[in-house]
Amino acid sequence: MATDIGIDLGSSKTVIFSSSKVVLELPNVVTVDADTWEPVYYGEKAKQTIGRTPDSLLSVYPIEHGVISDYDLTELMLKNYMEQAFGNKILRPRIMATLPAGLTELQHHSLSNVVEAAGGRNITVIEGPLAIAFGLGLDFSVPHGTLIVDIGAGTTDVAVISLGGIAACDSFKIASFDFDAQIIRYVRREYNIEIGQLTAEAIKIKVGCAVKRDIEVAMVAKGRNIFSGLPESFEITSGEVYDAIKDTLKLICNAIREVINKTDPDLVADIMADGMYLTGGGSQLSGFAQLISDYLGIKVHQMDDPTHSVVKGAAVAIKKPELLKNVDYQMRSIKELEIE
Ligand SMILES: Nc1ncnc2c1ncn2[C@@H]1O[C@H](COP(=O)(O)OP(=O)(O)OP(=O)(O)O)[C@@H](O)[C@H]1O
Ligand SMILES: [Mg+2]
């Protein structure tokens, strides 16, 4: 019997789904030897070393904005993750891997090749929003527009699905990592303190907000004074974080509007009637759904388990190859799926 595997190789982490559950979820970070580029650590340990490595080591994200930026490191990392997840127990796997919407055929092949080089077989690649549509159980037999927005770490993926295909889409290189970068800049400017990405992410998750909170919250964090070089604590409030990130929040709202503007009016009417589906780890920022809903005047359905909706959808899609037939570039691998 074939094993079905969904793989979401995101800008911040890899999620592998098999036998109805998440079997691996690890940061897409590799610590390498700065001279030889040989991997030293993968995953959680590599993430914890960001900003803390000696000069001889370097921690890198081999996937940027949802696409592979360092092919060799991605291959080694994924191989390591597949071994951690399955050992050598995988029996004739069928793999569905995902990538952002609107990319080139070459980028699809590149992902397929890297999964194959990491030990995968029978690989199909589909766009993340299409996978999410499978997970939502949309009726693919009728022409009806559904807007899906996935705010991840490195990309905001916006797509309108109709008849089981993508009617309009774009993938924007602006997402939750940008909030971290803005928080780092804000703290440097206002407090003369340098903080790392992990601290910025913790601030974003704990006190960040997309609409000003009625009751302000604050937290104490630590960094390094840029003048004295010594460790220093500071307190940062939700209002300050909002001020630091508000321009990016607006850019993301405008990006969604841009895709709606190029969507067929009949499909837009469907979206206005149904509301849109919001998912991705970045969408968990407090008040984000409300901001998008207010900005666009569209009801927003926040999906449960937002960091797994792509991979869970991919696992649904793999079982329904007949529904993927609208999409040309997948035909070769779909034929392989049918032979299984
Ligand atoms: N509670 C939270 N509030 C705000 N942001 C959060 C929260 N939880 C996670 N995030 C952010 O979500 C992002 C990760 O989201 P996700 O797992 O969807 O990204 P990804 O799939 O790896 O990236 P991409 O889809 O962009 O390639 C991180 O930047 C993380 O800081
Ligand atoms: Mg993602």
Image (cartoon, rainbow, N blue to C red):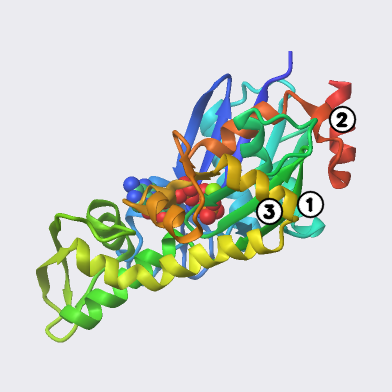
Query: In this figure, which residue is indicated by the disc labeled 2?
Result: 336
Residue 320: x %, y % from top left: 76, 25
Q: How crowded is mark 1: few (under 14 residues within 10 Å), some or many (20 or more)?
A: some
Residue 15: x %, y % from top left: 52, 38
- The dot on residue 203 is none
Residue 122: x %, y % from top left: 79, 33
* Amino acid type of the residue that numbered disc 3 sits on in the rendered structure: Ala
Determine the CA span between mark 1 and mark 2: 16 Å
Tell me the SS state at disc 1.
Answer: helix
Pick the quarter of the image with the N terminus.
Answer: top right
Please tell me which residue lies in front, 140 or 38.
140
Determine the CA span between mark 3 and mark 2: 23 Å
Q: Is residue 182 above or below residue 32?
A: below
Q: In this view, does 286 lie above or below 320?
A: below
- Between marks 3 and 2 in the image, the one whose residue lies nearer the viewer: 3
Query: In this figure, which residue is indicated by the disc labeled 3?
Result: 101
* Amino acid type of the residue that numbered disc 2 sits on in the rendered structure: Glu
- Looking at the image, tell me whether mark 1 or mark 2 is earlier in sequence order: 1
Please tell me which residue lies in front, 65 or 158.
158
* Residue 174 at least partly seen: no
- Looking at the image, tell me whether mark 3 or mark 2 is earlier in sequence order: 3
